[in-house]
Amino acid sequence: MATGSQWIEAARPKTLPASLAPVIMGIGGAIGLGYASVGKSALALLVALSFQVSVNFSNDYSDGIRGTDASGKRVGPQRLTGAGLAAPRTVLLAALSCYAFGGICGIALCVWAGSYGLIGLGVLAALAAWFYTGGKHPYGYLPGISEVMVFAFFGLLAVQGTIWVHAQMLPWRTWTAASGIGLLSCALLLVNNLRDIPGDRQSGKNTLAVKLGDKGSRYLFACYLYAALVLGVVSFSVRWEALMFGLALAIWVSLPLMKVLQGARGKALIKTLKQVGQITLGYGLAIAVQWAFQGL
């Protein structure tokens, strides 16, 4: 039977800051547009948190019952199902409970804002999260599809949906910033899959990293980071602040980038994952603060 600490580890708390970053960015945008709301912001953050935890539990369950998380193949954090620490049904129930809580918060937020169309997009986001590794034909096992979904839901929808329920408008800078944070989310996914290439090949999990191979994946990681940097800079409304942001981010991203380009692999990439998660959170916070104080 899994302990409390093992359940917390399975929820993968290190992934949570990156999942909050686009919502924080959206909240900053709403403040900059003059439409701040503590209640709506709190609900948006709860949706992001609960959906991220539900994704982590559902991936634990789905990969575990397929055998892709068997102890001999797993490089990353220990999983409950694959390691036999919890019954698959129990992990599934935890995932569904988190989905339900996030769904209730999301529906309440959309009804409050009068944005009923976003409920449909929220349902699509939940289905995309489940079918990443769930169902008979998970798209997480297909190259490129998961990256598109991550970009769309953890980038565009998370940022723009948060701004929309507050302000009912989407200035052009919000699109560039949302695209930038979406690319950072893709970079997180790529590092995770780069780390797991040997085990994924053995399990038949044909991710984009498996398809591109070790070298190609590392170059794509660099492209993600540099593209996000450029998109972040153009999202600032004050030039000197944009320059300072660009210089600071260029120095910051060089740390994980050098590790990846120098050939870090296996457990050495776990630290890189943490660094990219911190960069994603810093990216979202910096743009949110700039928008909140200087406007859009």
Image (cartoon, rainbow, N blue to C red):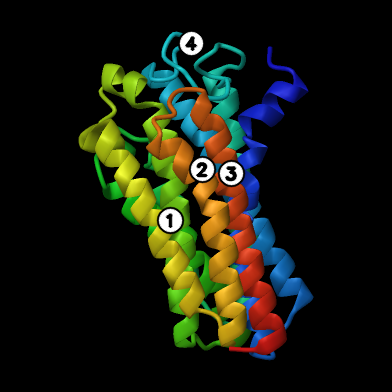
Disc 1 to disc 3, how far (Cα)? 12 Å
Query: Is disc 4 placed on a helix, strand or loop?
Result: loop
Identity, as a three-letter code, of the amino acid under mark 4: Ser
Residue visible at 56% across and 86% down in the picture: 239
Percent across and percent down for residue 104 are 63, 58
Front residue of 156/133: it is 156
Hey, what amino acid is under mark 3? Gln
Instruction: Give the residue type that dot 2 points to.
Output: Pro
Which type of secondary structure does the marked residue at label 2 adopt?
A: helix
Give the tally of numbered discs: 4
Q: Are marks 2 and 3 in contact (CB under 8 Å)?
A: yes
x and y percent of residue 64 in the render?
Answer: 45, 21
**Residue at which label 1 appears:** 225
Q: Residue at x 44, y 8 (%)?
A: 72
Would you say the residues marked 1 and 3 are in contact, meaning their CB atoms lie under 8 Å apart? Answer: no
**Residue 195 versus residue 257: which sits nearer the camera?**
257
Q: Earlier in the sequence, mark 2 or mark 4?
A: 4
| Few, some or many residues within 10 Å of mark 1 (<14, 14–19, 20+) | many
- State yes or no: discs 4 and 1 in contact (Cβ < 8 Å): no
How far is mark 4 from mark 1, CA to CA?
Answer: 32 Å
Q: Which mark is residue 256?
A: 2
Measure the alpha-carbon separation of dots 4 and 3: 25 Å
For residue 174, side relative to residue 219 (left or right): right
Q: Are marks 4 and 3 in contact (CB under 8 Å)?
A: no
Q: Which residue is mark 3?
A: 275
C-alpha span from label 2 to label 4: 27 Å
Q: Which residue is mark 4?
A: 71
Q: Earlier in the sequence, mark 1 or mark 3?
A: 1
CB within 8 Å, label 2 to label 1? yes
Per the model, the C-alpha gap separating discs 2 and 3 is 6 Å
Mark 2 / mark 3, whichever is N-terminal: 2
> Which secondary structure lies at badge 3?
helix
